[in-house]
Amino acid sequence: MILGNQVEWALHCMTTLARLPRDRYIPTKVLAEFHGVPKEYLSKAMQALASAGLVDGTLGPKGGYRIAKEANKISLLEIVEAVEGKKKTFNCQEIRFNNPCLKKEHKKKDSVCSIASAMFQADEAWRLVLRTRKLSDIVQDVTDSVPEEILKISDDWILS
Amino acid sequence: MILGNQVEWALHCMTTLARLPRDRYIPTKVLAEFHGVPKEYLSKAMQALASAGLVDGTLGPKGGYRIAKEANKISLLEIVEAVEGKKKTFNCQEIRFNNPCLKKEHKKKDSVCSIASAMFQADEAWRLVLRTRKLSDIVQDVTDSVPEEILKISDDWILS
DNA sequence: TATATTAAGGATAAAATATGTCCCTAATTA
DNA sequence: TAATTAGGGACATATTTTATCCTTAATATA
Ligand code: FES
Ligand code: FES
């Protein structure tokens, strides 16, 4: 069970957009070159972020994407779910009902298998961390840990 | 990011084996029919559980698998990792170092990206739940929630 | 001893997903 | 008018998951 590359790309792009002035649109081409990932494929991730309402895109020269909400209103979970979908990490196929001893009347779909229940608790714990952590926290961490000098020339590179 | 079917199968097989007498070996064929899954493919999961030391297998007639440790010494995480591997759910490919503004001397591999760090925290929260939950807890839940009658005829079916 | 049964594991194949590319359209700016 | 851009559809390729088949060695039992 491993998340796709799109997740890392999307998180980094969101962090990048969150650091930049809200009135500037950044094209996918620039985000792709800055992060060293294929532009056309990153474009799919950006479209997913847009349709989730996390960024908004605009056409034409000077177009591109900007962040759609304040960074403290965006959780990492929203970003992850935007590109990975909202399905739970454990897919219970109800194999308990394949038990050859069971009659139909015992296959009540209203109860949850104990095993699935435990797996869903783990899934929920994972989501809770991601839901609690906001994009603004990441921006703060980056600001604290990356030398100011590097942030400045990076921002200039992106905006130029 | 969704776990494979093997995980559900392995968890159910482990629960089944944990309920049965320790001195009996159950063949893959029986486990497969009881759970309604393909025998040859389930066999791969059982082999993984065996090489992780969670069950032990023996050859010949009256052979098969039995649980290798007490159920309260086996966590769900061990079972999941046995069949899914131990890789983290987030695969950081260090795209931060693709930043075209960075010189080589800034690409220190000793620090962890803030984003990866957050994702690893979520991964760890997921693992903590699974590490804390023991197979014996599941067996208890099943005993409490499934009618005694059904458990009995199921056990008889498997052992016969 | 002969036979049936079984785990272990290698080889292969089919199906599903993830990853990546190409191209067309409409909107927007200069 | 020309250049730029997101949106999105259609493909193409790579990787992973799921599944089957077959051989070997060990074991129990008749
Ligand atoms: S039936 Fe799906 S986990 Fe038990
Ligand atoms: S470089 Fe991998 S998550 Fe930041």
Image: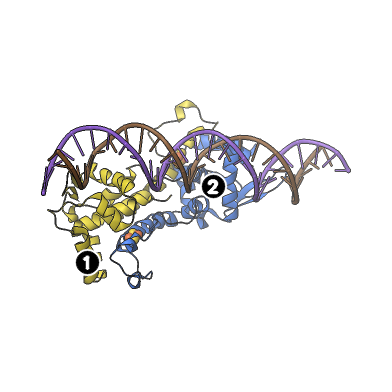
Chain colours: A yellow, B blue, C purple, D brown
State which chain disc 1 sits on. Answer: A
The residue that appears at 14% across and 53% down in the rendered structure is A24
Tell which of B64 and B97 is nearer to you: B97
Mark 2 residue element? helix
The amino acid sitting under disc 2 is Met
Evaluate whether residue A92 shows in this view. Answer: no
Percent position of residue A123, x then y: 36, 49
Which of these two is toward me, A150 or A132?
A150
Mark 1: which secondary structure? helix
2 and 1 marks in contact (CB < 8 Å)? no
Task: Determine the residue located farthest toward the bottom in the rendered image.
Answer: B105
Task: Determine the residue located farthest toward the top in the rendered image.
Answer: A104
Specify the label residue B75 is tagged with.
Answer: none
Q: Which residue is mark 1?
A: A153
Ligand 1 contact, mark 2 (Cβ < 8 Å): no
Residue A16 lies, in percent from the top left, at: 23, 58
Left-right relation of B53 to A85:
right
- Position of A65 with respect to B52 (left or right) is left
Where's residue A63, x and y in %?
Answer: 17, 47
| Residue at x 29% of width, y 46% of height | A43
Instruction: Determine if marks 2 and 1 fall on one subunit.
Output: no
Identify the chain of the residue marked 2, using the numbered disc in the image.
Answer: B
Q: Nearer the viewer, mark 2 or mark 1?
A: 1
- Number of other residues with Cα within 10 Å of mark 2, as a class: few under 14, some 14 to 19, many 20 or more: many
Residue B121, image quadrant: bottom left
Residue to which mark 2 is pinned: B14
CB at mark 1 closer than 8 A to ligand 2?
no
**Separation of marks 2 and 1 at Cα, in angstroms:** 56 Å
Q: Vertically, is B94 above or below B2?
A: below
